[in-house]
DNA sequence: ACTGTTTTTACGAAATTGACAGAAAACATG
DNA sequence: CATGTTTTCTGTCAATTTCGTAAAAACAGT
C-alpha cells in the first residue's frame, strides 16, 4: 500500500531541511520531472506518511514553561486518562510507556502558575491518576524533526 | 525586536492547520493584502519565531521503536553530555530538567536492537552518565504542534 | 506639523502548482 | 516470451502563487 523507496526517502530528506522547497527544485536535485515529485508527495500525504506543518518556537510565542510529566496510573485507566488529557491544548505529546511511568506527557505553559494549576487542579483530579513526576525544562539542547531516514 | 501582535498569531494559527497554505489565502482570511502576510511571515522567519518543516510519521518510515530516556548525570556534566548526544540523529529531543532526571531525551530507533545498542554501547559509555531510565513507547495518543496560541 | 521609520498596498514578472493525457516502464500471467 | 494490465513517469498549458519593487499609508518622536 505504501512502500517507500529510495526516492521517497530522498524527497522527505529534502523537505525536512525546508518544508517550503518547491517540487521543481527537488525534481532538479533528483534529476526527474517535476510531476514525479508532485505525484509522489501527494501519494505520501494521502497515506499519512508526513504532513506540512510549521514548528513554532515556544519561547517566542509566550510559552515559557515547558514540562515533561511522568504519570503513574491505576491499572486499566491509561486509555481513559490519555483521551481525557488529549483535550488540553497545553498538552503537546501523550504516550503510553513501559518503564517507570505508565503515561508520559509533554506540555507547554505560559508561566509557572499555569503549570501548577494544570498539575494541581486538573491532572490530580483525573480518576486513576496515582502520581505525577513533574520535570520542568531548564534548558533545551535539541528539538528536531529531521529523523534519521535511510 | 519581535513583538508579535494579534495578526501574527492569527497567521501562525492558520499555518499550524496547514503549513502549505498560501499567503494569498491567509490574506483573504484576514482581509489584508498578500504582501502584508508575506512580509510578516518573512519577518517572523528571520526572527526565528517559526519554521516551515514536515512532520514525518515515524512508523511509516521504519522507525518503529520510540523511547523517552531520563538520564541522571554527575554534577557539572550536563552540558558536555547534552552536546555529545546532539550528534546522534536518533535523538530528537534533549532538555535539561529540574526533577528526578537531569536530562531527558526522546529518540527514535529502527528496532529494539538499535535501542539496546544505543543505551548499552553509546549512552552508557559517555562520561558523567550515572543512570538511565529507559521508557519504551507502547502507544502514542497525541503528538501535535498546534500550540495553544492567544 | 514635520521628519524619519516602519508597515501596508499595488502591480507586473517570474515561478510554482494542478490537471490531464499520452508514453514509458514495471508487473503478473498464460 | 509475448501479452495485457497496471502503475509510474513525463510534458504541456492554464490557473494560481510567489517575488521584487515602488508608492502610499500609518506611526512615533520631537
Image (cartoon, coloured by chain):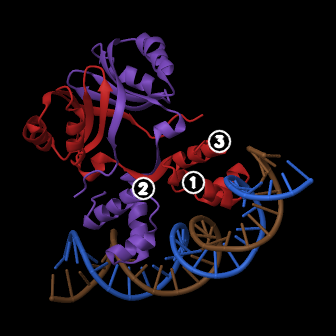
Chain colours: A purple, B red, C blue, D brown
Q: In x, y percent, where is residue B128?
A: 13, 31
- Horizontal side of A102 relative to A138 (left or right) equals left
Q: Please rate how many residues cluster around mark 1, counting C-alpha atoms within 10 Å: few if below 14, some from 14 to 19, many from 20.
A: few
Q: Please rate how many residues cluster around mark 3, counting C-alpha atoms within 10 Å: few if below 14, some from 14 to 19, many from 20.
A: few
Q: Image quadrant of residue B126?
A: top left
Marks 1 and 3 in Cβ contact (< 8 Å): no
Q: Image quadrant of residue B144?
A: top left
Front-lying residue, A45 or B102: B102
User: Do tags 1 and 3 sit on the same chain?
Assistant: yes
The number of callouts visible is 3
Q: Which residue is mark 2?
A: A46
Q: Please rate how many residues cluster around mark 2, counting C-alpha atoms within 10 Å: few if below 14, some from 14 to 19, many from 20.
A: few
Q: Which residue is mark 1?
A: B43
Q: CA separation, marks 1 and 3?
A: 13 Å
Front-lying residue, D5 or B22: B22
Q: Secondary structure at mark 3?
A: loop
Could you tell which of marks 1 and 3 lies nearer the N-terminus?
3
Q: What's the mark number on residue B89?
A: none
- Horizontal side of B37 relative to A34 (left or right) equals right
Q: CA separation, marks 2 and 1?
A: 32 Å
Chain to which mark 1 belongs: B
Q: Which residue is mark 3?
A: B5
Amino acid at each position: 500500500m505504501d512502500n517507500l523507496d529510495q526516492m521517497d526517502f530522498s524527497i522527505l530528506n529534502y523537505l525536512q531541511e525546508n518544508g517550503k522547497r518547491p517540487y521543481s527544485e527537488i525534481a532538479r536535485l533528483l534529476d526527474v520531472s517535476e510531476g514525479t515529485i508532485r505525484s509522489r508527495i501527494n501519494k505520501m500525504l494521502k497515506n499519512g506518511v508526513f504532513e506540512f506543518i510549521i514548528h513554532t518556537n515556544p519561547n517566542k510565542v509566550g510559552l515559557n514553561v515547558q514540562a515533561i510529566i511522568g504519570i503513574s496510573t491505576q491499572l486499566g485507566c491509561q486509555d481513559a486518562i490519555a483521551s481525557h488529557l488529549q483535550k488540553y491544548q497545553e498538552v503537546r505529546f501523550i504516550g503510553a510507556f513501559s518503564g517507570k511511568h505508565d503515561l508520559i506527557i509533554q506540555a507547554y505553559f505560559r508561566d509557572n502558575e499555569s503549570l501548577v494549576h494544570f498539575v494541581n487542579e486538573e491532572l490530580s483530579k483525573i480518576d486513576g491518576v496515582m502520581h505525577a513526576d513533574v520535570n520542568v525544562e531548564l534548558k533545551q539542547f535539541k528539538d528536531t524533526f529531521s529523523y534519521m531516514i535511510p
